[in-house]
Amino acid sequence: MSRPRLLIDGDTLKLEEILQVSRHEVTVELAPEAAKRVQASRALVDRVAAGDTPSYGINTGFGTLAEVRIDRKDLRDLQRNLILSHACGVGQPLPLPEARVLLLLRCNVLAKGFSGIRMETLGLAIDMLNRDVVPVVPERGSVGASGDLAPLAHLALVLIGEGEAFFEGVRMPSKQALEKAGLKPVVLEAKEGLTLINGTQAMCAVGTLLQLRAEMLADVADIAGAMTVEGLLGSHKPFLPEIHAVRPHAGQKAVADHLRRILKGSELVETHVNCSKVQDPYSLRCIPQVHGSAREGIAFARRILEVEVNSGTDNPLVFADTENIISGGNFHGQPISLAMDVVAMSLTQLSSISERRVEQMVNPSLSGLPAFLAKNSGLNSGFMIAQVTAAALVAESRILSHPASVDSIPSSAGREDHVSMGMTAALKGRQVSEFTRSCLAIEVLVAAQALDFRQPVKPGKGVLAAYELVRSKVPHMDRDRELHHDITAVTALVESGALREAVRTATT
């Protein structure tokens, strides 16, 4: 069955389309107008390469060696040597979805027509994407200075038949992968090596999938919080619109609105209208304020990514219209680094308040429920260590939330004297997102147990939909069992989007 087409032109790629490519769900094609721009910029590079005037990246060395003039007969070796020497990555390979996105984003930047790539080279990269030849790219080794040099060099290795690639998910030498896919490597011409490795595409590849997960987790955090509110017989009044109208932060208002929809139709709230409790703890009462500020941070990162994935990040840039080839600093990853740090901090904020809500449920002096939500507590420990696990994940997330974007370590003999650490920020953010996903899954699991003690009275429609989905996979815990299986099952509901979708369907 043929896959839908995705035209790339360097200007209009959407984050949701990137997600489709990460899953190998679409066929990528170069837009005709983009092809014309690519050809025009290449023609200019060819003219410069044929002349005697030094031009960085075309007939000179690189970085601190930019003043070294290279003979015309050595230009092919110059480009090949650049790729080989810069392929210094270490660590685990990027997961296949992220590596696919890396390849896509590099193709999209080249499609802008400011890179000077040949159509043959760009065409091979697009064919690799469509035929599931995915470069093996080690995660570590980028400081985000001239972009993600090491990761992109590993990508470029495959184009010249070196390094390794995955073909249909199986790791092998790149020559073998290309052959199995019916493709042939290219010989790089003037500037093409530099064109392939200057840019922020590795940090953006990790960052885009992190961003989409963070947006999903922001919704799940609201769902988990609403489940806890119902399980603890919390008040709905802190979510009333008039409260948020007088402090009209967009994120805060959005969360309060979301909570009202999830809690709508609650029978549980009617059971404690005249209770003696005056106020709920902050972890319940201040959900809109805390979750809302996290949403604002995540929204900021989206705006940065939407610009960056469609930006020219090469150096030098080739302007065919004015016949100028200009060196600049668009490869510097500072915008992405800061954005990824903000995402990590925002997610840590969500996991931190979630863990406090779990404590509210398992602590009998706070909840009014059986200790650790266990029947026959003492003999059974219930969810005691589920809260401990959440606390451990939050503690590590706080460490990982130390910003990479304020750090810098000079490289390239002082030429690259301020770097962004953008890839570090993205990788830290990815880890925090995984911890946050687990923390929220724990809260959802624990809240479902709390809601069991409130039966037969029903919670709000959104909470009920979440509860019923959880219970379709995980039964009530009557006696102690291996809770890690339950946490894994709920985590899968979170990661797949099933939990969010179930609540969305019930509340629209």
Image (spheres, grey):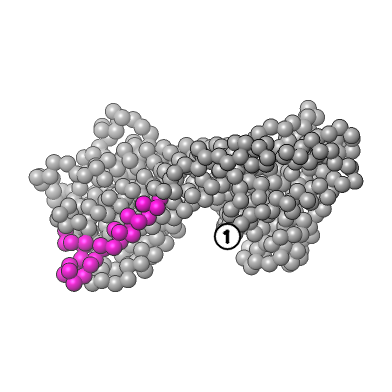
* Residue 461, x across and y down, in percent: 28, 52
Q: Give above or below for 389 relative to 234.
A: below
Q: Give above or below for 367 relative to 295.
A: below
Magenta highlight on residue 384: yes
* Residue 180, x across and y down, in percent: 73, 67
Q: Is residue 230 left or right of residue 506?
A: left
* Residue 367, x across and y down, in percent: 17, 54
Q: On the image, numbered disc 1 is attached to which residue?
A: 92
Could you say which is closer to the camera, residue 394 or residue 102?
A: 394
Magenta highlight on residue 404: no
| Residue drawn at 64 percent across, 59 percent down | 136
In this picture, which residue range is highlighted in magenta? 369-397
Within-10-Å neighbours for mark 1: few <14, some 14–19, many 20+: few
Q: Give above or below for 116 relative to 474.
A: above
| Residue drawn at 35 percent across, 56 percent down | 392
Quadrant of the drawing holding the N terminus = bottom right
* Residue 381, x across and y down, in percent: 23, 67
| Residue drawn at 32 percent across, 67 percent down | 483
Secondary structure at badge 1 equals: strand
For residue 132, which quarter of the picture?
bottom right
| Residue drawn at 56 percent across, 43 percent down | 421
Q: Residue furthest front?
A: 413
Q: Is residue 173 left or right of residue 467?
A: right
The disc labelled 1 sits on which kind of residue?
Answer: Gln
Could you say which is closer to the camera, residue 312 or residue 458?
A: 312
